[in-house]
Image (cartoon, rainbow, N blue to C red):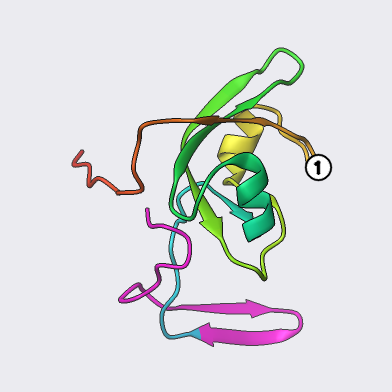
Amino acid sequence: MRNSGDVANSPGVTLIGPAGTLTLEEGLICARRHIHMTPADAAKFGVEDRAVVEVTVNSEGRDLIFGDVLIRVKSSYALEMHIDTDEANAAEVVRGQTGTLSATDATAQLRSRRR
């Protein structure tokens, strides 16, 4: 689990498909859930790059609060939240769905967990 964009010293991968093959020397990560936004979006929502928020999603009987959501701010970004497929399925999130941001006292620091 890594912050979005933190690919240094990560494993590589080769993808093979009908259009050909693509090999990356590094870059294979499981990205922490995050929201891309422009500086204007960040100002509108009162957050800054690397802030951590919660996002509440209301759905048909599967409401969920996503915690530890990292904010990524850059002028080339478009406003969009990135979560993995399992997380989206758990809350029955569909493309284009909206959520509500809530500020937290958390920081954007990853913890290593041993099983």
- Quarter of the image with the C terminus in it: top left
> Can residue 66 be seen at all in this image of the molecule?
yes
At a point 55% along the width and 24% down the height, the residue shown is 65
Q: As drawn, which residue projects farthest toward the left?
A: 114
**From the viewer's perspective, is 105 left or right of 65?**
left
Q: Residue 17 in the image: x percent, y percent?
A: 69, 77
Does 4 lie within the magenta span? yes
**Number of numbered discs present?**
1
Q: Is mark 1 on a helix, strand or loop?
A: loop
Residue with the mark numbered 1: 96
At a point 40% along the width and 72% down the height, the residue shown is 7
Does 61 lie within the magenta span? no
The stretch in magenta equals 1-23
Q: Residue 76 in the image: x percent, y percent?
A: 67, 71
**From the viewer's perspective, is 57 left or right of 8?**
right
What amino acid is found at the position of numbered circle 1 in the picture?
Answer: Gly
Query: Principal SS element in the magenta part?
Result: loop
Among the 4 quarters of the image, the one containing residue 8: bottom left
Q: Residue 36 in the image: x percent, y percent?
A: 61, 56
Among the 4 quarters of the image, the one containing residue 21: bottom right
Tag 1: Cα neighbours inside 10 Å, few (<14), some, or many (≥20)? few
